Amino acid sequence: MAPLGRWLMILGALLMVLGALVVLFSRLGWPLGRLPGDLVYQRGNFTCVFPLATSLLLSLILTVLLNVLSRWLK
């Protein structure tokens, strides 16, 4: 059970850091979700947003972060 507890503590710490970064960037006006590659379709009072560039950026960042963490924890 010790390895599970360790993983849960690491995951909790990462979620706290991620939450703090989201709050900080939202106050600074960082355009997460409004990047140049994000698709927005508006017609009348209907809006459809597909954050393509944001999804790719977050995927890249999380892939690098998880690869570094998995090598560090071995």
Image (cartoon, grey):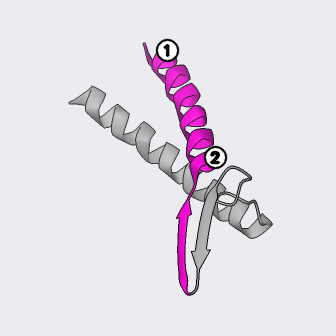
Residue 53 in percent (x, y) is at 63, 46
Task: Judge from the rendering whether residue 50 lies leftward or rightward of residue 25; answer left or right.
Answer: left
Q: Residue at x 56, y 29 (%)?
A: 65
Q: Quadrant of the N terminus?
A: top left
Relative depth, front residue between 8 and 31: 31
Mark pair 1, 2: CA separation: 27 Å
Q: Which residues are magenta?
A: 45-74
> Who's the residue at 55% across and 87% down the image?
45
Residue labelled with disc 2: 53
- Determine whether the residue tagged by mark 1 lies in a helix, strand or loop: helix
Residue at screen point 49% across, 49% down: 15
Depth check, front residue: 44 or 36: 44
Task: Find residue 24 and report its horizontal and vertical position in percent.
Answer: 71, 61
Q: Compared to 9, does 30 lie above or below?
A: below
Viewer-proximal residue, 69 or 52? 52
- The residue beneath circle 1 is 71
